[in-house]
Image (cartoon, helix red, strand yellow):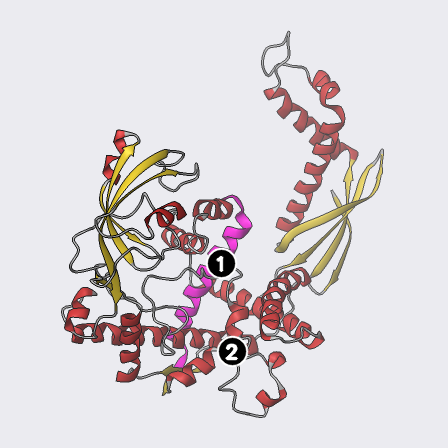
Amino acid sequence: MEILSRTSDGLKRAYVVFLSQKELDGAEQIQLQQIAKRAKLHGFRPGKVPLNIIKKMYGASVVAESKKKAIDDTVIAIFKEEQLNPFLGYKYDILKEDEKGIEFEVKFELKPEVELKDMSSIELTKLVVPVTEEPINKVLENIRQHTPYWCDDVDATEVKNSGKIVVDLSIINGPKKLKKYTGEVEIEMESPHILDVFRENLVGAKIGEVRQFSVKYPDSFGDKTLAGKNITYSANVKKILKSYIADLDDDFAKKCGYDNLEKMKEWARDYLSASYDKTSRDILKRDLMEKIAQMYDFPVPDSMVNLEQKNIRMQLESEAKRLGKEFNSKVEEGCTKLAVEKIRVTSVLMRLAKEYNVEATNQEIDLALRNVASMYPGREKAVIDTYVNKPEMLHVLVASIKENKVIDILLEKVKIKEKEVSFEELKARDEETFDFFQDEGDKAGEDKSQEPKKATKKAASESKTKQSSKKKAVEASSADATEEEKPAPKKRAASTKKSSTKKKADVAEGE
């Protein structure tokens, strides 16, 4: 092997290398020997087929594979010998090939070299929001409004498309093993999961009336015991229930799993405090990364910038469309600037991870995988398998874990002062806009309180995988609750105090 030339342009490198025919023949011989060990041919013992016969059998493919391996081995040897650290591998082109050997050019980009600086002088401000009675009461009221309770509807004369009913269900025609599905069953008539055939046959029935009907369950039905079955039911309407909103008192708190209303208020206070603190810490982390970006100025690989810019562009194009903004050249320039800054910050954090011996544990990786998979209900296993089978995706996940751990370490080292602010001020900082998405009125300091939420710095820093929009059973939409978490009581309240029916309407609920 002989290096004929070396050229460099920033982090870009290009080497022209010559490999002699003797070196290529040696690589081909090794390839033939490896094939011979596995070859099975009539008349020869396993692994004893002569190399000249193997060459005749595999000919051109052996030459091509051995040539590629010789080039790959040569490039790797150069990287090791010259202590080069390439980004995203390398590409090569064969320039010349004759009886003497081959001449090829290999091109690659180096990862940026980071010379660490002292960060102890960094000063940050942590925003602190005091928890007052008003937001606590809003959270509790919101839970109250979203927690329906059920009681007998004494004025109801027949089953309608709304409310809930209790029916005594029996099977007239169907497998005996389905007996567990019979007995008193609660059916919420407005539920989108209820099969239409149940709703159609029960609407109009009076208390004590018996309705008979057949149900053909689809093959894809969630309960595999029922899937594909054709069953005839007899349904005796026992009760018609109506929902009501309970008073916000000790009884309500007990139904939600608390000793009394005061204990529930303590939970709401703790929840809001943790929620505010999480938002404040997220802002603190972004501020820290901005400080790091300002401290460092080193070249980054173009290929790395292109990849990051593509990710940021996708996010901001979506934001621009949502806000009715134009994705113009100014925004395009902003994407490039953001990409470069993010790469620099990531490079610094990865260098610090090495300096601090930070690693991602198997438990942390498993938790991160489960969190990502949970954003795709019903496809969790497929998502996890994708990450496991694609090392580059798993590498990004592991790098993210390391980055967060390094940031936590840095926040213990830098200077942090606290500043008390209102929730509105905290929210405004959390939704701080990029300059290239701000209107002229925004820059002039006009009142924006009535304007829709603008593209935030947080949006571009988040992962491409979006959070699931699946609604929790109990959630607060109070302005005092952050978007990251929604409050919920300790445990779900009972559906009705008067009814002892506990059986789910599995037979009536579709997917």
Secondary element at tag 2: loop
Secondary element at tag 1: helix
In the picture, measured across the screen, residue 130 lies left or right of residue 47, that is left
Q: Residue at x 42, y 85 (%)?
A: 425
Q: Residue at x 37, y 33 (%)?
A: 229
Q: Earlier in the sequence, mark 2 or mark 1?
A: 1
C-alpha distance separating marks 2 and 1: 30 Å
Tell me the amino acid under the disc marked 2: Lys
In the rendered image, residue 371, in percent from the top left (x then y), is placed at 41, 56
**Dividing the picture into quarters, in which one does residue 439 lie?**
bottom right
Of the 4 image quadrants, the one containing the N terminus is top right
Residue 127 in view (yes/no): yes
In the picture, measured across the screen, residue 94 lies left or right of residue 120, that is right
Residue farthest top in this picture: 43
Query: Front-most of 97 and 376?
Result: 376
Counting the numbered discs, the total is 2
* Mark in front: 2 vs 1: 2
The residue indicated by pointer 1 is 399
Q: Residue at x 65, y 70 (%)?
A: 336
Q: Which mark is residue 453?
A: 2
Q: Residue at x 23, y 72 (%)?
A: 267
In the picture, measured across the screen, residue 31 lies left or right of residue 283, that is right
**For residue 398: magenta?**
yes
Residue range in magenta is: 389-416
- The crowd level at tag 1 (other Cα within 10 Å; few <14, some 14-19, many 20+) is some
